[in-house]
Amino acid sequence: MKKFVNDPKNFVPEMLEGLALAHPDTLRYVPAYNLIMRADAPRTDKVSIVQGSGSGHEPAHVMVVGRGLLDAACPGDVFAAPPMDYVYETTKLLATPKGVLLLVNNYTGDRMAFDMGKEMADADGLRTEILTVNDDVAVTDSLYTVGRRGVAGNFFVIKAVGAAAEQGAELDDLIRIGRKVNDVTRTMGVGLTACTPPAKGSPLFELGADEIEFGVGIHGEPGRERRRLTDADAIVDALLDAVVPDLPYKSGDRVALMINGLGGTPVSELYLLYRHAHQRLAERGIRVGRSYVNEYCTSLDMAGASLTLVRLDDEIETLLAAPADAPVNPF
């Protein structure tokens, strides 16, 4: 598998350094903690929003550090949770009088790192809270989680709490908003190929030419089942059949619809998937109020996509529509 890579051990630091060099007016890079932070952070007039998780999911999360989104991101290595001390030191650097909100996708390693980092920050007298995202309907438990996984739906949580924080919301209200968005967000993904981590140099798993992994995780972990490849509309129907009944979403609902590319899918194919999803939702009486078609949370170079729905109300929709600015700003 051909990749642009030097020493695989330096893949993440070199990527982060390049990101900071490309955006020197808005981003600051702290190599000791794999930390990308806003150049104007911390700001005493707002809660700092921090996300971690492993690398390999770009633009999540380091490329959505900016106004109205994250104040900082401290990733680990590819598909690996950040070390606890990265979380702790990041929390100290981002601490403000209004507190720090730590967003955590529901993976065991991430939860452990952030729980321990928070405990150390709390012992220093810092005010911190953790909000866990678990939007994936594919599996209840996986190789990496206790409970549902946090996947592309985390972008809606980031966008809502980031917008509210920019408007001066207090930490307790951000927790309320984040939980509210997470509670009405559901995602399901499908993989057409495996992904290839730089350090491994070969695919994480094998899929036959006529096979797809239905319910795949963003680290390449298995989902509900391996299926035969079929046409795009049938795949969308299967994703909707998994997502819609889960909340459930009902006739009369207004939703945000996201088609997220997993890293190796052309945007033309993502819009093809969006077309059928939009049509099928309309047939169910579910109106699409906001549309998102792009790469939001990838799995390196995996060909595949995920479908996310968010039930909208006036508060959520207003926050999703608020201005935001980051190196990658698909909102």
Image: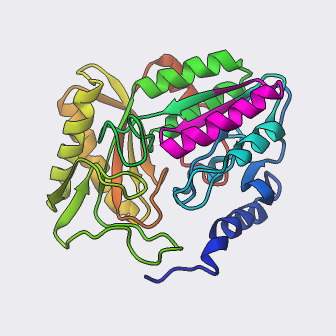
Query: In terms of depth relative to the viewer, which is nearer, 269 or 147?
Result: 147
**In the displayed structure image, the side of residue 282 where residue 126 appears, left or right:** right
**Magenta span covers which residues?**
101-129
Count numbered badges in the picture: 0
The image quadrant that residue 269 belongs to is bottom left
Q: Position of residue 3 (x, y in %)?
A: 51, 80
What residue lies at 40% left-to-right and 25% top-to-bottom?
A: 184
Vertical order, 187 against 217 (above or below):
above
Determine whether 206 is above or below 185 in the image. Answer: below
In the picture, the quarter occupied by the C terminus is top right
Q: Nearer the viewer, residue 274 or 129?
A: 129
Residue 107 sits inside the magenta stretch: yes
Relative to 224, residue 231 above or below: below
**Color scheme of the displayed model:** rainbow
Asked if one can make out residue 68 in the rendered structure from this viewpoint, the answer is no
Q: Position of residue 241 (x, y in %)?
A: 19, 37
Q: Residue 167 location in percent, x, y? A: 71, 24
In which quadrant of the rendered image does the N terminus lie? bottom left
Please say whether residue 185 is one of the residues in the magenta stretch: no
Residue at image point 77% right, 32% down = 121
Closer to us: 330 or 111:
111
Q: Nearer the viewer, residue 12 or 296?
A: 12
Q: Which residue appears at 48% of the width and 43% of the height?
A: 107
